[in-house]
Amino acid sequence: MSADKSTDASNDYRIKPGSGWSGAWKKAAAVGVFGFALAGFGFTQDAKRFAFSYLFAFFFFLSLALGALFFVVVQHLTKAGWSVTVRRTAEFFMAGLPAFAVLIIPLIALMAQLFPWLAPHAAAGHGASTHAEIALIREAHAADLHAPQAADSHAPRKAGPSVVARVAARDPEAALEAAKAHEHAKLIEGKKSYLNKPFFLARNAFYIVVWAALAYWFFKNSTDQDRTKSRQATVNAQTWSPLALALFALTLTFASVDWLMSLNPTWFSTIFGVQVFAGSVVSALAVLILVTMSLRDTTLKGAINVEHYHDIGKLLFGFNCFWAYISFSQFFLIWYANIPEELAYFHMRWSENGGTWQGVTAALPILHFAIPFWLLLSRNVKRNAAGLVLGSVLLLVVQVLEMYWNILPNFGPFAPHWLDLACFLGVGGAYLAVVFHRMENFPLVPVGDPRLARALHFENA
């Protein structure tokens, strides 16, 4: 289908009073207040569960905002003309990034509830029991007290290996747990130059500042151009996009390591940050499709056509396949190498926690790849509104599930809690209130971009 050549030139692409999107930010804010009130009550009941539920909600919406930032930067980097009319929607979701400077405060306050590396002995809870180690120490101490006094009264008493051997013979499982606790403590000790609170806080301050600065600059540069119609704004965005992309890659990768991978500090993977990145772009593209679809017959009428959706659908399909490739690569290499420290991630989501996460683990490849691949592969589906919406909804829901699967196994068995929903509503409501407020105050299309006419009449060859 060709672009709508009869587009009204007087259309300012602003949300009109009385439309379904008018006042949407107030509704989102109300949802956020309700969610935070409910979550606040949950915090008083179970602070640890609150911390994990909040991290799940926080990082999902953060990844969505970062995926939108990536989309905006790449459009400038590639000097894309076709995407000008859809870029502003991504800019709105990118512009919500400064809100995370406030939303991160509860996580900073509750770090001790999340990260075993803050209290090395607590790391035993991730696969080893400190009680077993304590039992061995007490047994050795008791044997020491009853041991014959050495000739040199100042010589320290030492429990011989026979003490540990006797305990191991009596309770092999306790001895094994103690040994695991000792190994976990050694691993964490070796990473303390990176995993320590001052450095962690400094890194996260850097991430937040970089994200907020990039979002502010690109959004201001774009919206100022609406008024000035200056071509220099486009040149500036293209000039700074390579540096922005490098900073994005650096900060997202290290933030994924800090907030997700270090939940189990004995595990490591060099590809994990790329997997999180792929998921963030999938989320952003799915939201971009859903939001513009809901506005295409009103505010965005004539600005976005089937050709735009076809291209966004191809990006959605491509990045989801990229996510599958990265996820399979990580799994296959860990399985093939069979190194205990690397296996911990999948072991926790399959064998540990009573095996309760097996169903989610088995469902993710099907819901996140097999079904979307079959659904979105066809050109006809990507050019069909209903099919594209269905695929976008599915992938967005599965991205939420995957983030839950990344975080909550570190808390315990699969047991969804009302705090998960409360935190999701709180964080999501606050973030979307900022996004929707921007949507009501600026045009939904970059009306000052010199490539706007090309985007309005975009057709695939």
Image (spheres, rainbow, N blue to C red):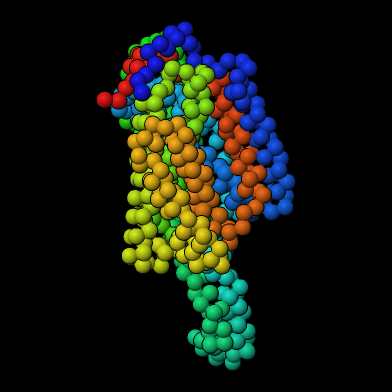
Rendered view: 114 above or below 428 = below
Q: Position of residue 104 (x, y in %)?
A: 57, 40
Number of dots carrying numbers: 0
User: Furthest residue to the left?
Assistant: 461
Instruction: Give the camera-side residue of 78 and 366.
Output: 366
Point 46% across, 50% down: residue: 367
Q: Position of residue 371 (x, y in %)?
A: 42, 48
Point 48% across, 19% down: residue: 300
Q: Where is residue 84 in the image (x, y as percent from the top left)?
A: 38, 21
User: Furthest residue to the top?
Assistant: 10
Left or right of 136? Residue 280 is left
Quadrant into which the N terminus falls = top left
Quadrant into which the C terminus falls = top left
Tell me the quarter of the picture where residue 123 sits: bottom right
Rendered view: 347 above or below 286 = below
Left or right of 138? Residue 70 is left
Point 63% across, 17% down: residue: 18
Q: Can residue 388 be seen in this view?
A: yes
Q: Is residue 95 visible?
A: no
Left or right of 48? Residue 324 is left
Rendered view: 175 above or below 40 = below
Q: Position of residue 154 (x, y in %)?
A: 56, 82
Point 33% across, 65% down: residue: 337
